[in-house]
């Protein structure tokens, strides 16, 4: 496969953009080689600027659950171009999107639209602090909640991929407001609350982690978070930027039957366009300006482009529950029978092949993966027309556009890798 045009573009980009990319993981630093510059996407496929075609399991990092250029989303975007792209004033469509979100995710009694997952988690934390009058937050090692100052502590995603333990530019006092505990350890959460329960405003968690690779919650873990936070008067925040509308119409909270106080949602509610949201209990959300004293704002929040695309996406998901059954089936097919020495974690249509005998249950176990082997696997798959996230510590996503043939072709490419004597784990 030739990547000459990508190489040329990357050389230019590196002179203009830090690392040549607008978000670090996509720079291919941990897998080596040149990031592919994408020319277009359609259904389950993406095409690079050199004309190569790939079955895509990144799906813009999750939101493209119906595939690239899903026709109703494209149609909604066409319609909105006729009326205007931003007003900085309310529109009818925002009310419809809020209503759809509330119907699908009942714990969200009120919702505020923002523009990125980072804004959503940052705002949810501020609201939790303002509501409780407390300053500390519990997060979990290997979870990633966007690049919010106080949450870049033992974070997953790019921080894990690039091996950055603590980011520069965050004053120690900010980081000190965060307690990072091992994911799936109820004991650690109990101990933290015993010691400092009167200061803990919130526990924020990816209910199924996607940002250290896919790591499911252990039986009873989410229930324990719900019980302990309620007992101490702290808020439970589910970061469903990846899992929302993906693991079920009502997200991970529906799948696991837990009702958080606040939820953050990401670009899936915009059909893949830049948008996000935070929402939850009405008594908590009522503290936000202009109703209450907690300030948060944004000119592009609720812009008609993202909102219209989101309405088209959520309407379709709501009307077609069979999408979730299909995703479950296809992803199970993709991840069946891993070779010895490889751990496959899967929840619904999120999955990771860990080059690690496992089990992988938290960051300590995830980071024992053989990233050198992953690197070879990644490039092998790319050469065989399969585009995976360029990091061992990111989840893969199957979309409704992935056909049985796509899955079979992907599984065959993976089998080819493991069958080759150089690659047997
Ligand atoms: N942090 C994102 C995934 N967890 C990746 C962002 C990107 O490169 O687009």
Image (spheres, rainbow, N blue to C red):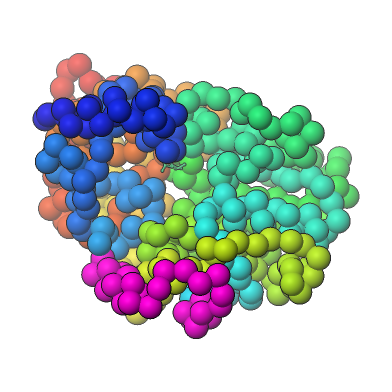
Q: Give coordinates of residue 335: x percent, y percent.
A: 29, 45
Above or below, 231 relative to 6: below
Residue visible at 37% across and 69% down in the picture:
309
Viewed as shown, does residue 299 lie left or right of 343? right
- The image quadrant where one finds ligand 1 is top left
Residue visible at 26% across and 58% down in the picture:
68
| Image quarter hosting the C terminus | top left
Q: Magenta segment range?
A: 70-96
Above or below, 344 relative to 399: above
Q: Give coordinates of residue 159: x percent, y percent.
A: 53, 31
Q: Give coordinates of residue 158: x percent, y percent.
A: 48, 33
Q: How many marks?
A: 0
Above or below, 105 relative to 124: below
Residue visible at 63% across and 43% down in the picture:
148
Give the farthest residue toward the top. Answer: 422
Viewed as shown, does residue 19 lie left or right of 173? left
Please indicate, yes or no, whether residue 127 appears anywhere in the rendered image: yes
| Image quarter hosting the N terminus | top left
Residue visible at 44% across and 43% down in the picture:
214
Q: Nearer the viewer, residue 363 or 117?
A: 117
Q: Give coordinates of residue 130: x percent, y percent.
A: 80, 58
């Amino acid at each position: 496969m030739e990547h000459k045009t990508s190489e040329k573009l990357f050389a230019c980009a590196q002179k203009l953009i830090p690392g040549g990319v607008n978000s670090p993981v996509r720079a291919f630093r941990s897998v080596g080689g040149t990031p592919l510059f994408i020319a277009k996407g359609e259904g389950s496929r993406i095409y690079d600027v050199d004309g190569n075609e790939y079955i895509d399991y990144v799906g813009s990092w999750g939101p493209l659950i119906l595939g690239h250029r899903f026709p109703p989303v494209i149609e909604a975007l066409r319609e909105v171009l006729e009326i205007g792209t931003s007003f900085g004033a309310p529109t009818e469509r925002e009310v419809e999107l809020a209503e759809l979100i509330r119907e699908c995710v009942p714990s969200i009694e009120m919702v505020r639209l923002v523009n990125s997952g980072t804004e959503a988690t940052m705002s949810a934390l501020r609201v939790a602090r303002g509501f409780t009058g407390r300053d500390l937050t519990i997060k979990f090692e290997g979870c990633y909640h966007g690049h919010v100052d106080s949450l870049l502590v033992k974070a997953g995603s790019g921080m894990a991929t690039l091996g950055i333990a603590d980011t520069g530019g965050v004053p120690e006092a900010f980081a000190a407001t965060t307690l990072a505990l091992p994911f799936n350890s109820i004991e650690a959460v109990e101990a933290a609350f015993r010691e400092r329960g009167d200061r803990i405003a919130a526990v924020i968690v990816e209910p199924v982690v996607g940002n250290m690779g896919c790591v499911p919650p252990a039986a009873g873990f989410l229930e324990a978070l719900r019980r302990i936070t309620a007992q101490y008067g702290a808020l439970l925040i589910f970061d469903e930027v990846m899992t929302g509308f993906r693991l079920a119409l009502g997200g991970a909270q529906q799948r696991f039957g837990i009702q958080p106080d606040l939820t953050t949602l990401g670009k899936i509610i915009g059909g893949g366009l830049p948008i996000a949201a935070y929402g939850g209990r009405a008594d908590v959300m009522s503290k936000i300006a202009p109703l209450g004293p907690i300030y948060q704002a944004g000119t592009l929040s609720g812009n008609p482009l993202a909102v219209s695309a989101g309405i088209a996406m959520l309407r379709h998901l709501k009307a077609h529950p069979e999408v979730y059954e299909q995703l479950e089936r296809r992803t199970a097919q993709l991840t069946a029978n891993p070779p010895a020495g490889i751990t496959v974690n899967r929840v619904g249509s999120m999955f990771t092949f860990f080059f690690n005998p496992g089990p992988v249950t938290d960051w300590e176990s995830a980071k024992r993966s053989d990233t050198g082997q992953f690197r070879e696997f990644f490039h092998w798959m790319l050469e065989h027309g399969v585009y995976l996230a360029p990091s061992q510590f990111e989840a893969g996503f199957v979309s409704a556009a992935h056909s049985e043939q796509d899955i079979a072709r992907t599984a065959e490419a993976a089998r080819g890798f493991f069958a080759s004597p150089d690659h047997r784990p």
